[in-house]
Image (cartoon, rainbow, N blue to C red):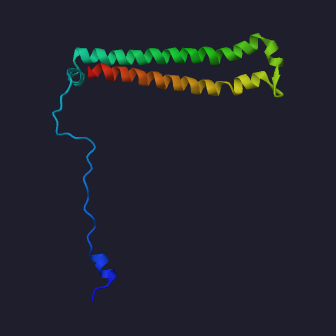
């Protein structure tokens, strides 16, 4: 006499299935530019150098804008004393300008830097794929 308990313990677990994300049966053609990048030829080095220069240019531009804006706020409040007398929601304007305004600005600069870096990398990848 077999019970349901013994039949359940004697059952084998289901077989594992192989999951294939990409079909690799086709011929894999490596573009010449990828080979130049891997071999570190002069052409590959020039392409990578161009990517690094583009990203450096963008980061220096955004850093300069940040320094000008964030460094200019205290100077503006120092040179225009009338701004110190203004109150918004019964809070002095300098407190709002120096304590609240920089944070959304820094987030905006970070977002712009990320988008620009992704754009440069996307352009580089398109160049490599040609």
**Number of callouts:** 0
Residue shown at the point (68%, 24%) measured from the top left: 101
- Most extreme residue toward the bottom, as rendered? 1
Please identify the quadrant where the C terminus is shown.
top left
Q: Residue at x 25, y 62 (%)?
A: 15
Q: Horizontal placement of 19 versus 53: left or right?
A: left
Residue closest to the eye, 90 or 64: 90
Q: Is residue 10 left or right of residue 105?
A: left
Residue found 64% across the figure and 19% down from its top:
70
Q: Give 21 or 89, whichever is nearer the viewer.
A: 21
Quadrant for residue 45, please give it: top left
Q: Position of residue 25 (x, y in %)?
A: 17, 39
In this picture, is 73 found above or below 22? Answer: above
Percent of width and height locating residue 112: 52, 22
Q: Tell me what residue is drawn at x 82 percent, y 19 percent.
A: 86
Q: Quadrant of residue 2?
A: bottom left
x then y, percent, for residue 33: 23, 20
As drawn, 28 above or below 63: below
Quadrant of the frame with the N terminus: bottom left
Q: Is 40 on the left-hand or right-hand side of 70?
A: left
Query: In the displayed structure, would residue 11 be above or below residue 72?
Result: below
Q: Position of residue 63 (x, y in %)?
A: 53, 18
């Amino acid at each position: 006499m077999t019970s349901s308990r013994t039949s359940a313990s004697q059952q084998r677990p289901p077989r594992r299935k192989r999951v294939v994300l990409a079909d690799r049966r086709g011929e894999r053609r490596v573009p010449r530019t990828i080979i130049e990048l891997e071999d570190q030829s002069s052409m590959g080095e020039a392409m990578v150098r161009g990517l690094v220069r583009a990203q450096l240019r963008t980061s220096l531009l955004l850093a300069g804008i940040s320094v000008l804006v964030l460094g200019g706020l205290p100077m503006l409040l120092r040179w225009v004393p009338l701004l110190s007398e203004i109150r918004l929601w019964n809070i002095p304007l300098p407190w709002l300008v120096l304590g609240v305004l920089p944070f959304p600005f820094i987030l905006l600069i970070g977002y712009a830097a990320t988008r620009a870096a992704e754009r440069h990398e996307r352009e580089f990848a398109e160049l490599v794929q040609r």
